[in-house]
Amino acid sequence: MFFLGNFVGEGALECFGPLVRRLLLTCFLRKCTVVVLIMGDCMKVEIEPGVPIPQTRCKYPFDDMLPGDSIFFKDERKAASARVAAVRFAGKYHPTWGFTLRRVEGGWRLWRAL
């Protein structure tokens, strides 16, 4: 009979993975002192096949931009933030793409260069 935190009984080890079960059983058989803290009941996890992975979480339409397309910003800070997001986006999803930010009349414009 095992006593592990909130679990009492022979089925107490079912909530652990095989490596942890082996470790606990080995320690039990060798009469080691084992302290296991469990916060609640054993959680059952359901596997859901066929759920598609979202493409991006980007708030800017970088993926839809073609070379020469641009986005206009009135605020310099938002333009700079978008430039950083564009560079990170390109580095992660399209390493050959390039972006450039320039000051234009009335604000800032971010172009997809390549």
Image (cartoon, grey):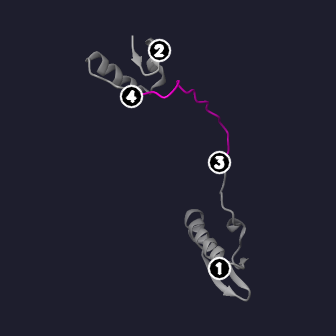
Q: Where is mark 1, residue-wise? A: 76
Query: Dots 3 and 4: beta carbons under 8 Å?
Result: no
In the structure shown, which secondary structural element does the residue marked by tag 4 occupy? helix
Magenta span: 37-52
Q: Is residue 18 magenta?
A: no
In the foreground, 31 or 70: 31
Q: CA distance from mark 4 to mark 1?
A: 54 Å
Precedes in sequence: disc 3 or disc 4: 4
Mark 2 neighbour density, 10 Å: few (under 14) some (14–19) many (20 or more) = few
Mark pair 3, 4: CA separation: 30 Å
Image quarter (top left, top right, bottom left or bottom right) of the N terminus: top left
Residue 97 on image: x %, y %: 60, 72
State how far apart marks 2 and 4 are (Cα). 16 Å
- Badge 4 amino acid: Leu
Q: Secondary structure at mark 2?
A: helix
Q: Which residue is mark 3?
A: 53
Q: Look at 69% across and 63% down and name the residue there.
A: 59
Choose top left, top right, bottom left or bottom right for residue 108: bottom right
Amino acid type, callout 3:
Ile
Query: Spatial distance from mark 3 to mark 1, Cα to Cα?
Result: 33 Å
Report helix, strand or loop for mark 3.
loop
Q: Amino acid at mark 2?
A: Gly
Q: Is residue 43 magenta?
A: yes
The residue to which callout 2 is attached is 11
Compute the Cα span from label 2 to label 3. Answer: 36 Å
Residue 110, quarter of picture: bottom right
Q: Which mark is residue 19?
A: 4
**Residue type at numbered disc 1:** Glu
Work out whether 14 lies above or below 91. above
Find residue 14 and report its horizontal and vertical position in percent: 47, 20
Select label 2 or label 3 by which is in front: 2
